[in-house]
Amino acid sequence: MDFRDSPEEAAFRARLQAWLAENAKKFPTSGDEYWAKAGEWHQALHAAGFFGSTWPKAYGGQELPAVYDVIVDEELARAGAPARPSLGYLVIGLGRHGSEALRQRFLPGMINGTERWCQGFSEPGAGSDLASLTTTATLEGDHYVLHGHKIWTSYSDEADWCLVLARTDPAAPRHKGISGFIVSMHQPGIEQRPLPMMNGVTKEFGQVLFDGATVPVDQMVGAPGEGWKLAMTVVGHEREPSTLGFTARYGKTVRNLAATVDGPPSDELRWAAVQTEMLRLHVRRRLSEQLDEVSHGPDGSLDKLLMTWVEQSVGHACLASGGTRDPELLGTYLYSRAQSVMGGTSQIQKNIIAGRIIGLEV
Amino acid sequence: MDVRLTTEQRDLRDAAARLADDLGPGSVLDLDDTERVERLEKAVAATGWRSLRSDGASGVEVALVVEEFARGLVDVPLLGPLLTDDLRARLGNEAEPAEPVALAVGDEAVDARGLRGALGLRAAGAGAGGAGGTVGTVGVGEPVFGIDLTRTTAAASGPFEPVGELSADDALRWQALALTVTTADILGAARGAYALACEYAKVRSQYGRTIGSFQAIAHLLAESLALIEGSVSVLRYAAWAVDELEPAEAVRAGQVAKVYTARAAQTICETSVQVHGGIGNTWECLAHVFLRRVLTSGALFPVSLEEIDLGLS
Ligand SMILES: Cc1cc2nc3c(=O)[nH]c(=O)nc-3n(C[C@H](O)[C@H](O)[C@H](O)COP(=O)(O)OP(=O)(O)OC[C@H]3O[C@@H](n4cnc5c(N)ncnc54)[C@H](O)[C@@H]3O)c2cc1C
């Protein structure tokens, strides 16, 4: 057992540090300014060899072990750079369920950041109960025609492509009638409406309305009716702190707060420091376990719950450190409330943990 | 970076778990079963685990055994003898004592059930070990009041007889080990309380359904499990740090682990009491035995939130 870097890991870290010394400050880390340059950041990070390190070489990765992502996250936070773009769950979803032709067409652009993506799962009437979604995709010749309303779609205004779940067989049982599609966002029949968050950020997510948009038959991911499997893979990985790359950012926030508080730090801040350190170590343990190729299961829900508690404790620390007088601190606090909703609410994570890990009949 | 347990470490953990499951108390009544305690004592003595440190075991291995013993409420000394064995090894004292030695802390001997001698570290100066200290022996006197039903604390008897000096580094490493093993004890007891509650939630039925099918109960248990997973992660780092990081850093890792785990464990035990309903508030339910053990190990080498260093690594 060793928590330290191996020689190869240390060399990778040193190269990254050198690159960040040149490049980190060129990119804003929060708010709408961050979103405006998020694509450029993604491309720069990939071009330098520090994004997608763990993915297959065939699609633009380097096939490094999962722990390399920890190094990237830590160094990005230390350098005050934006976080690692979080789309690992889409890469994994498409990688696992898409045909080889789709993987070759779409994974490289997704990984190198030249094509931006969003995830069109949630609808006004289908949030936690995703399988109740009503957006339809109707086969007409060599393409499907989409009608429906997606909401909370992160990055929808920047996206070139949307991974859409739509109902292709209204007669089938509800989990079986859903299919997944790769839909171009640049076409008539799609309307994108921004949705300001409570912290004032306007570019985080939006609503997407489909009214006659089309998608070629061969851009269906998997077979008709296999959309639910795809969805479960995507949301399963969307829960993992290690896939999301946020974790090191929490530590940075805590350190910044500690450096600026007058007088003794509040209990909230100290507790956030403990929580943040816990998550740092937890992610290392989880990523090490991936070396055993343990198949990914409901454990991601435990990690998501832990990450949520950590982010919200950091939010409370921001609030306790002058958050009612400082828009940036208040923004971090307010944004932390979304963590127990996005990617499946904390209640849903607890249902999964109780039912699938503990074995309770919830 | 690879923080998995090795095969040998997993085997050691499994062996400790088996022993605890076989001979630890399965009920509150079992606590008074002196025949069981004798068999347990014999079995534990035969493992040699009380001298793991002088046999070259790492902090990780020690923590695994302590955690499993606490999960099974093993009610013969382990933590005290382990820590005194480490002290002796640091003094370069090769000769194994004839019987396990309790841990002298202040004017008490902890984890002293059935033991006659205790060994402890008196820090030089004000800091907890930062300037080194004196190792010395005391006798084990009469038991004193303690909330733990599985371990005995006794008054120290006779004077503190110095037997050697520890350097500042050695004293800090020992402190890191003390934080690690008490944290492992807390985590083990919390896992025991959690397992007890899960079993109960699957069999107790109200309104014609098992209580575990009520979301309010299921969510409490899900939270407990997440707290356990977080605690495992902080403890593993602290246990590794005992031997591998700079002494002061090892102490910091131990402090974070202990603060996090102690809070988590109290919540987990309180949840266990709640899930058991009325039964959970009775002497007969093991939930309070776990809670008492958690609180006792939390109060031994306590860490407060104020001590947490904010300059995170
Ligand atoms: C910042 C952010 C980004 C997002 N990004 C995306 C995205 O990119 N793509 C996308 O598709 N979606 C996205 N979402 C949507 C997110 O997945 C949903 O908001 C979430 O699944 C909850 O659905 P809902 O909002 O409809 O709430 P509801 O499902 O209506 O839930 C309301 C409340 O009821 C509780 N509840 C519901 N069902 C149960 C139950 N069975 N047991 C116990 N409690 C229950 C919930 O926990 C919650 O507290 C995002 C959300 C946020 C906040």
Image (cartoon, coloured by chain):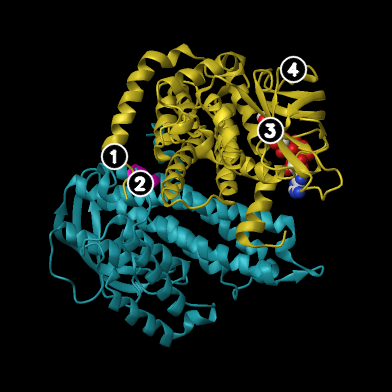
Chain colours: A yellow, B cyan
Ligand 1, seen in the image, is in the quarter at top right
Quarter of the picture holding the C terminus of chain B: top left
Give the residue drawn at x 53%, y 63%: B291
Same chain for mark 4 and mark 3? The answer is yes
Task: Name the mark on residue A90.
Answer: none
Mark 4–mark 3 contact, CB under 8 Å? no
Please give the chain letter of the residue carrying mark 4.
Answer: A
The total of numbered circles placed on residues is 4
Q: Is residue B287 in the magenta section?
A: no
Q: Give the quadrant of residue B36.
A: bottom left
Residue located beneath label 3 in the image: A218
In the image, residue B147 sits, relative to residue B36, either above or below, namely: above
Task: Name the mark on residue A187.
Answer: 4
Position of residue A234 measured from the top left corner of the image (x, y, whole percent):
62, 40
- Amino acid of disc 1: Ser
Farthest-out residue, right? A171
In the structure shown, which secondary structural element does the residue marked by tag 4 occupy? loop
For marks 1 and 2, give the CA distance.
Answer: 9 Å
For marks 1 and 4, give the CA distance.
Answer: 49 Å
Mark 1–mark 4 contact, CB under 8 Å? no
Q: Nearer the viewer, mark 4 or mark 3?
A: 3
For marks 4 and 2, give the CA distance.
Answer: 47 Å
The reply, left or right, for residue B195 in relation to residue B246 is: right
Q: Nearer the viewer, residue B283 or A350?
A: A350
Residue located beneath label 1 in the image: A6
Mark 1–mark 2 contact, CB under 8 Å? yes
Q: Give the quadrant of residue B105.
A: bottom left
For marks 1 and 3, give the CA distance.
Answer: 44 Å
Mark 4–mark 2 contact, CB under 8 Å? no
For marks 4 and 3, give the CA distance.
Answer: 17 Å
Please give the chain letter of the residue carrying mark 2.
Answer: B
